[in-house]
Structures are given as C-alpha cells and as structure tokens.
Amino acid sequence: MSLHRVLTGAPRSAPATYAEHVAQFGELPRTIDITKELLASGLTGHGGAAFPTGKKVELLKNQRHGVQFVVVNAMEGEPASMKDRVLLSTNPHLVIDGAVALANTLDADQVIICVPRDRPKLAAIVQRAIDERPSRARRDARIELQTPPGRYVAGEESALVHWLNDKETLPQYRPTRPAILTIGRSATLVDNAETCAHVALIARYGAPWFRQVGTANRPGTAVVTVSGAVKPAVTEVPYGTPIIDIAKKCGVTTPPQAFLLAGFGGVWIDGAEAHRGFDDDSLRPIKATTGAGIVVALPLNACGIRETARIVRWMAGESARQCGPCAFGLPALADDLELLASGRRAEQTLSRLQSRASVIEGRGACRHPDGVVRLVRSALEVFAADVVRHANGNPCVHAQSTVVHVPATQREEELEWQ
Amino acid sequence: MAIRKRGASFRLVVDPVRCDGYGHCHELAPELVTLDEWGYPIITANAFPGNDRELMRSAQLAVRGCPRMALVIERISAQ
Amino acid sequence: MIGFTTPYLWYSSRATGAVSLCLLTLVMVLGPLVSTRVGGRRIGRFAINELHRSLSMVAMLFVAIHVTATVIDTYVPIGILSAFVPFTSPYRRLPVAIGTVAIDLMIAVWLTSYFKEKLRPDLWRAIHWLSYGSFVAALVHGYLTGTDAHTRWYLMLTVGCGAAGMAAIVWRITARPERAGGRTALSPLDAPSPARRKS
C-alpha cells in the first residue's frame, strides 16, 4: 500500500541534490505546454481546495495579458500538516521542476517559492536547491525564494498574493470568486508545493501513468500527515486508501475514537467511519474532505471537547482581526467551548455555542471563521455523548491533558481601535 | 442612484474588512440590518424589490451614513 | 482702486469670525463622538454623524462670509490672495497667515470628505486628522487678529472653545468605544448587562 511517487527516495538524511534528483527521475522534459496532460490526468490541488490543476492552468492561459508569475505555496500554516516541509526536505527539485513546467506552459517569467520565515532551515534548503539548478536558458523562468511571515492565514492564496504585492499578509475581501489573483497587474498561478511535485511527474510519465492509482475522481497519490495518537509522521498513499489503514501505517494500534480531517479548519469524524477511503467521494456523505492530507487520530482516553477548545482558541488568535464577526466571534466560541469542556454551567453554553456559530458563519472576508464554525459543529455532533455528559457536570476528568499538537499562541493582542 | 427596473431586486452588501461596527446601518435601515452581539451588521433581507421606495431609501441612507463606506447596494437580478 | 468700506462690513467680519469659531468647535467636539461610537440609545449614532457633517457645511459657509466681508472691505488691505496664501497680508501678517492656514487645512478636509467615495480610505483619514490643526489655527488666529480679542466676552469665548476642543482631543485619545450591540436608537434590545459589556 505504501507507494512512493513524489516521496521517492524517502527517508533521506539530506535533500536530494540536483544530480541525485536527475539520477532518480531523469531530467524534466522540454515539452512546453502540459495543459492537456494536466487536464487528462485529473490532478487536483493539494493545498486543501482540490481545484483541478488543469482547469486552473487553462483559465489562466485565457487571460488577455498573459501570466507572469507562478507561485509555489509551501507556507503550510496548518499546524497539523508537515507534508510540504517533508517533501521539500526530500525532493526539492521535483517541486521546482513542477513549477518550471507550469511556468513554461503559461509562458510566465518568474517562479516564486514561498516558505514561511520562521522556518529558516527550510528556506536554506530551498535556496540551496535553487542555486543548484543548471543555468537557465533565456526562455526559462527565473526562480526565487520569498519568506512571508508564517501566520495561519498567510498560507491562504489571496493573502499570500497580497503579501507579495504589498508585504502585508491580510486576506482580501473577494466578493466575486474565482478572482484571478494578480501580482502588480500580472495574472498569477498559485499552487501548493505538493501539487507542483505531481505536475513534475505528470510531465515525465504522462496522464495515464498518473491515473494508475487512486480513484476515478481523485487519481494519484497524496502525501498525508498523521498525528495525534502517534508521533507526527508523513506518508504517501493512493487516494481511496481506507483511513484506518493510513493511521495503522503510521503506528496507530488501538482504533481511535475519532479523527480530525483536513486540519484545524476541517471536521471531526467518528472512529467508526475510519473504514472509508481517503478521498472526497467517500467522505462527502459524512461532510468531510481530504483537505491538505491531514489525519489527526484522537485516542480513546482523550476528550474531544477539550481538544476542540484548544484548537479554536488558537484559531481565534490567528484571526487577521479585520472583520468583527471573526475577531470577536472566534474568541467567544473558544470561551464557550472551554466552559463546556470544564463542565461548569453548561446548559446555556451549548445553545449559545450553536447560535453563535450560525451568526459568525459567512460574515468574514475569508474562510477562516467558516472553517472554525465547521469544526465546532462537527465536534458537537461527533462528541455528542461527551457534550451531554459535560453539560450534566461530568467532564472527562481522566482524559489525557493534551493530544492534538496546538502551537502556543504567539501573542495576545488587544484589539486596536483606530 | 439605483435604477429601478421592473422586477429587479437589490440587496445591501457589507464589506466586512472595511466595516468597524459603528452600527449606523442598523439605525438607518432596521428593516434590512440587525446587529450581532458585538455590534457588527447582519444583513437580514436577502433581497428587496427595486420598486419598494421605502426600502430603497433606507438602503441608500445606510450606504451614505456608514462612516467607513462599507456598504453597497447590489442588483441581484433583472427580468 | 475703488474704495469701499462701511463699518457694517467690519462688524460682519468680526461677528462671523466668532460664530465660525463656535461652529468649528462644535464640529470638533462631534467628530470624536462619532469615532468613539457615542450614542445609540436616546440619540442615534447616525444622528451625531449627520450633525457633524451638516454643521461642518454651515461652518464653512460662515467662514466664507467672514473671508468675503474682510476682503471686500478696503478699510484693511487684505486681498483675496491672503485668504488662501499665508504671509501675503500687509495688515497683521502673522495672525492673518494663521487664519489662512486654518482655511487651507479646512478646504483640504472638506474637499476630501466631499469626494470620499473616490478616495482611498486611508488617504481620507490622514487628511482628516489635519482638522485638529485647523481648529488650533483658527483659535489662535481669532485671539491674535480679532479687534475684539481683548474684550472679556471674546476671551471667554476663546477659552471656552479651546477647552471644549482640548476635551474632545483627550476624549478621542482615551475613550474605549463601546460595542454597538444592543445600544442603538431603534434596537429592541435592552441595555447590556455588566457581563455582556465585558465582551
């Protein structure tokens, strides 16, 4: 079941050099336009939104003024995700190949790889890989590294492009979607680092090869980060692999009570659903998605409410604070969840939680608050039995104190008034 | 000035980034806007017909009165 | 040069000057009340905003009359140029110049507000801050230039307006705006309970 495509050669003690990369994969073919291959392959984005890559490229090709930039999004703001880091630390040249192939297809003249600035080692790896590239022909795109600040919302593609434009990581209000992202006045393609790696393989081996594994609607493999009940591990599996198998592969022994899929902005699913395949079609009935390949396993001796409270508190701190419903609503949700977790005065807390969730949803400029609302609703559903117990004053006193890795809140800022 | 075509419906749309919770919109157009517990607008009316003069007037007052210029009137459909 | 003068022009200039100062002070006090979200229960917040906007137009009108009366009157050699370009007045150069600066800043604020939709919000905001400078300049101009400046009533007026303006500035800096929730003029909700106020 373990299938290495983009992670071929893993585990490595050091990133593959250009020579090692060529020895393993061969050189990137000089074909200019891979749009048809991408469309035929059915490759979808690995950043969480799962937009068909071929369609994105096609949309941008039809832009009147041409595309100038290809941005590789390796920001990975989701704390529960490590795949992009691991991929770049293993096969950085594969990612770069993909970006170059996309740039050639779109006749773009610059590739920008974005790595968060609080990961200097990763930035150094990428820079070294860029320097190792053979000197480019005049037609080829220039490749450069940029290091925006590593806040959670900074990895959202419009926020990332906003930073590249104005050096500010604030998500923009985009009332009409999909808006073509622009840097300056030039259209820009933004793709996740792992997506670029898959593009590099499709450029070499073609669409039929790509479709050999995975499901009909989601062909190919995904690099998945598994954490929670086990030490965080990254593994590459074909889409459609049962979730419980992915978890077992990473060391999970006892069936978990629940899984958190798609990260802190994703949803909880009941442990009983773990037989489902890791792909959007089998997850849709339970309102879950594969997201950016994230699986957090919650062991039996943990409290789902408490973990959700910690996650929501952190997500509240990561709000860009541009919009009132998010800036004030998320901390309020965190307050309610913490109250619920503690088991004190819980009858009104539950209804207040539900009404607040409805009020907050859809009223921000970006999807950050919506993701949290989704998470909270799924927690109330999956941990419904716990909720009842907590509401009656019986919190999970014997539960492990923390399971999900939630980063420390970086700074507690008072909202500023202008 | 919104053009009132027969059958066209309109709605108030708030730019959540510009909005700073002043609440003038709720005061000027209570039929179209309520406030959440933190003072930020919830647009309650999904659409109102273009030939409803009162609602259109309320909406226009709300747009003009917003200190942050965070509101616009959007036309949804025309038949 | 045709000479034209009547004491009534001079009285008008002084009177409208004093009235302008009062109106401007009112505008200066209302501004921070808008941005600190005062009101909502007995007086609508929108009402304070509208008052601020309307009064500024009235104030500009009185300033215009004040300038016109002064310029037409040939008793003092202040020409139209001096109304807009500082330090061009042969009569009481510095005090008039300060008044000119006040007008120039006022025009900048007024124009940007008139074309508010066409401008970037942060540009509008930055220029709007100049209104404080305009107010101080108007206050100082009135005290240094005015024929009535040393009468008791004018002194009290200056001190009163100055104090009000100062209070407005302090309020602007220190007040923590209350949440709008539950406190608007037409809201059916009650005043927030102490627990709710904290959020």
Image (cartoon, helix red, strand yellow):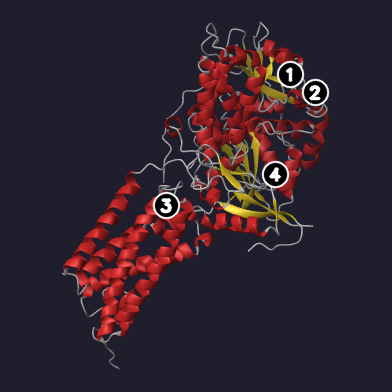
**Which dot, 4 or 3, sits closer to the camera?**
3
Chain letter of the residue carrying label 2? A
Write down the residue under mark 1: A3
Tell me, for residue A213, which label it has, or none.
2
Chain letter of the residue carrying label 3? C
Q: Is residue C182 left or right of residue A230?
A: left
| Quadrant for the N terminus of chain A in the image | top right
Question: Distance from label 1 to label 3 (Cα)?
Answer: 63 Å
Asked if residue C108 can be seen in this view, the reply is: yes
Residue A384, by quadrant, is top right
Q: Amino acid at mark 3?
A: Val
Which residue is located at x 41 percent, y 56 percent? C126
**Which dot, 1 or 3, sits closer to the camera?**
3
Tell me, for residue A31, which label it has, or none.
none
Write down the residue under mark 4: A104
Q: Amino acid at mark 2?
A: Val
Mark 1 neighbour class, 10 Å CA radius: few under 14, some 14 to 19, many 20 or more:
some
**First of labels 4, 2 by sequence position:** 4
**Which dot, 1 or 4, sits closer to the camera?**
1
Tell me, for residue C34, which label it has, or none.
3
A304 vs A123, nearest the viewer: A304
Q: Amino acid at mark 4?
A: Asn
Q: Is residue B42 left or right of residue C67?
A: right
State the SS at label 4. helix
